Image (cartoon, helix red, strand yellow):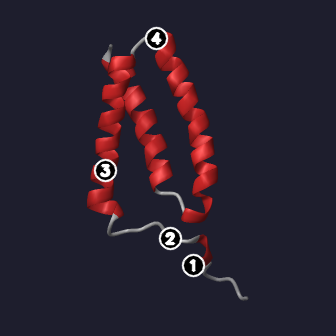
């Protein structure tokens, strides 16, 4: 497998996992369904190119990178709730 395809799949799978990880708890079910659709597209591409071994390696690397993000940044900056967002300059 070439480096470009490796980096593309790593970016796509890491982004899917990152979006699920950083989603608000109330909206997580909808986001998982939408990201599941994109995951099916990635699986179709992997099946088309017959690169299952590399895809498993890339998935494990994406999981590791997302775990590192959570460990270093995500634990100390939890996902906020949309109820707690205040818009400055609005007179309610």
Q: Nearer the viewer, residue 30 or 84?
A: 30
Q: What residue does disc 2 label?
A: 80
Spatial CA distance of label 2 from label 3 is 19 Å
Q: Residues within 10 Å of mark 3 (few under 14, many from 20)?
A: some
Distance, label 2 to label 4, CA atoms, is 39 Å
Is residue 69 in view? yes
Q: Residue furthest right?
A: 92
* Residue located 37% across and 68% down the image: 77
Looking at the rendering, in which quadrant would you find the C terminus? bottom right
N-terminal of the two: label 3 or label 1? 3
Q: CA distance from mark 4 to mark 1?
A: 45 Å
User: Where residue 67 is drawn, which disc sits there?
Assistant: 3
Going from the N terminus, do you reach mark 4 or mark 1 first? 4
44 sits to left or right of 57: right
Residue at (50%, 50%) from the top-left corner? 20
Check if mark 1's residue and mark 2's residue have beta carbons within 8 Å.
Answer: yes
- For residue 55, which quarter of the picture? top left
For disc 4, the marked residue is 49
Residue identified by numbered label 1: 84
Q: Give the CA separation, mark 1 to mark 2.
A: 7 Å
- Residue 49 vs 87, above or below: the answer is above
Circle nearer the N terminus (2, 3): 3
- Residue 27, given in percent of the width and then of the height, sits at 61, 59
């Amino acid at each position: 497998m070439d480096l470009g395809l490796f980096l593309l799949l790593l970016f796509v799978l890491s982004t899917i996992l990152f979006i699920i990880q950083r989603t608000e708890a109330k909206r997580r079910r909808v986001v998982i369904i939408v990201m599941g659709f994109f995951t099916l597209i990635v699986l179709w591409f992997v099946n088309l190119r017959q690169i299952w071994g590399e895809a498993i390696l890339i998935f494990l690397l994406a999981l590791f990178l997302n775990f590192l993000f959570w460990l270093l940044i995500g634990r100390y900056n939890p996902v906020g709730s949309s109820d707690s967002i205040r818009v400055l300059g609005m007179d309610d």
